[in-house]
Amino acid sequence: MPPDNADAPELDPRRRRLLFRACHRGTKEADLMIGGFVTRHIAAFSEAELAEVESVLELPDVDLSDWLSGRREPPPHLRTPMLERMAIECGQPGAGLPPELRRP
């Protein structure tokens, strides 16, 4: 699971809830990919982007893990700019690893 965001107490309640939901998905793979992405970007997300992330988090973990890892393509009707952004970042080598375990 991604490390807790050290700045989390400074986040507003909506961002804290979203960060918790992203980091506690129910599967280790989803926690690392989705939680890592949200942890890295939560402070900078606009209100519209927060809504997009909330929509993505409503999708089933099994599907999200497959789509974000590149095992399957998401259906066209579910492709959103945020899901695409997440897929690009999560598809990078080592994306699910904690920063201290990634190769430079």
Image: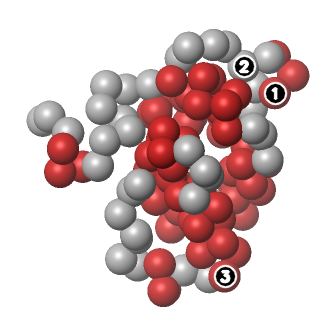
Name the residue nearer the viewer: 9 or 45: 9
Disc 3 target residue? 13
Q: Earlier in the sequence, mark 3 or mark 1?
A: 3
Which residue shows up at 81% across the image and 16% down it?
Answer: 76
Disc 2 target residue? 74
Q: From the viewer's perspective, tell me whether residue 22 is left or right of residue 41.
A: right
Q: Amino acid at mark 1?
A: Leu
* Quadrant housing residue 101: top left
Name the residue nearer the viewer: 35 or 81: 35
Crowdedness of circle 1 by 10 Å Cα count: few (<14), some, many (20+)? few
How many numbered marks, from 0 up? 3
Crowdedness of circle 2 by 10 Å Cα count: few (<14), some, many (20+)? some
CB contact under 8 Å: marks 1 and 2: yes
Whether residue 64 is visible: yes
Which residue shows up at 46% across the image and 59% down it?
Answer: 39
Provide residue 42's location: percent of width, then percent of height. Answer: 53, 62
